[in-house]
Image (tube, rainbow, N blue to C red):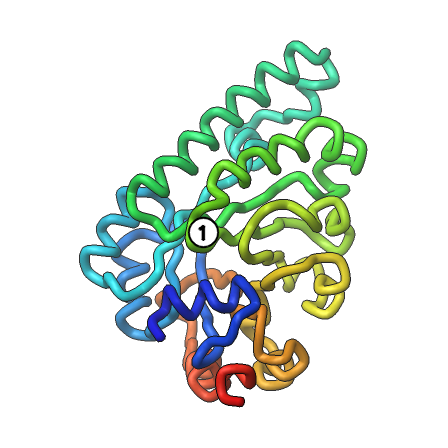
Amino acid sequence: MDSRERLVAAARGGAGDRAPWFAWSPATSARTATDFAKKWKPDAVVVESAIDCGQVLAEAPDVAVLVEVGNPFGEAMQAGVDLNEEFSRGPIDGSSAFGAYSQGVASSLQAALRGGADGVLYRLFGADPGLSSPMQFGGFYLEKERELLQSIADARLNVLYVEGGEEMFLDVLADLPAQAFSWDEGRSHISPHEVRKVRKGALACGLESDHRKLWDDFGGTGLIFCGQVSDLSEYDFSVVSEAAQDLPSPAAHE
């Protein structure tokens, strides 16, 4: 079973030959991602553009490649634009600003798939009380998030990664379309078991967990070991890499 088959099996609740895993850092270059793939043999890497995707695939064709794309709220925030403030001025101003960033994100999503990516790591900002209220997020942004993710639903593997702290709006996000769901475990202190209560489907989490216990708790299915690190080139992935090799899917070996 190759990396792509392993990830697809995990994302769809099927049996794989072993536990799949990957890790990522924001804005990772093609060179860093390729070096990471060759050294540690993860099942996927994450890059910041469709161009970088092509470069990685040319040098490391056996690894799945995801392109990092921020949601409209996050892209606006990065540009110094407060979409909630735009909406407070009136629906025309808010819709105009939000629509512009949404179009940009839609273009980035399609460019990623045209560039050969296996899918997208979609970073969702705004579903956190530090950035918006549940009413604001649900009323202004949620349905567009659903529409954007649905537009790439046919990709091999899309990972929805939720940025936020302990009070992130998990319930609101529970049914957004993505093959795997991930979140900031370190900042939120929300466990995979808590997320499983509200989110069906595969979880991408537990990079620094007790891998065997988590794998056993989930029955060896629907789990991709994954996490965000500050620097791919400096992190020691030997523990998760060795654990993944040693954790076969029980269903695959009955």
Residue at the front extreme? 254
| 105 versus 192 height, above or below | above
Q: Is residue 60 left or right of residue 87?
A: left
Q: Is residue 142 left or right of residue 134?
A: left
Front one among 241 and 118: 118
Give the secondary structure at mark 1: loop
Residue at 35% x, 36% y: name it: 111
Q: Quadrant of residue 237?
A: bottom left
Residue at 46% x, 88% y: name it: 246
Residue 91 image point, x, y percent: 70, 13
Task: Quarter of the image for the N terminus: give it.
Answer: bottom left
Task: Specify the amino acid type for callout 1.
Answer: Pro
Residue at the left extreme? 58
Residue 21 image point, x, y percent: 46, 71
| 141 versus 86 height, above or below | below
Residue 103 image point, x, y percent: 48, 24
Residue at 54% x, 55% y: name it: 179
| 195 versus 213 height, above or below | above
Front one among 125 and 229: 125
Front one among 12 and 207: 12
**Which residue is under mark 1?**
26
How many circles with numbers are drawn on the protein? 1
Residue 94 image point, x, y percent: 65, 17
Residue at 72% x, 34% y: name it: 137
One can see residue 189 in this view: no
One can see residue 155 in this view: yes
Query: Dot 1: within a 10 Å radius of its alpha carbon, few (fewer than 14), some, or many (20 or more) residues?
Result: some
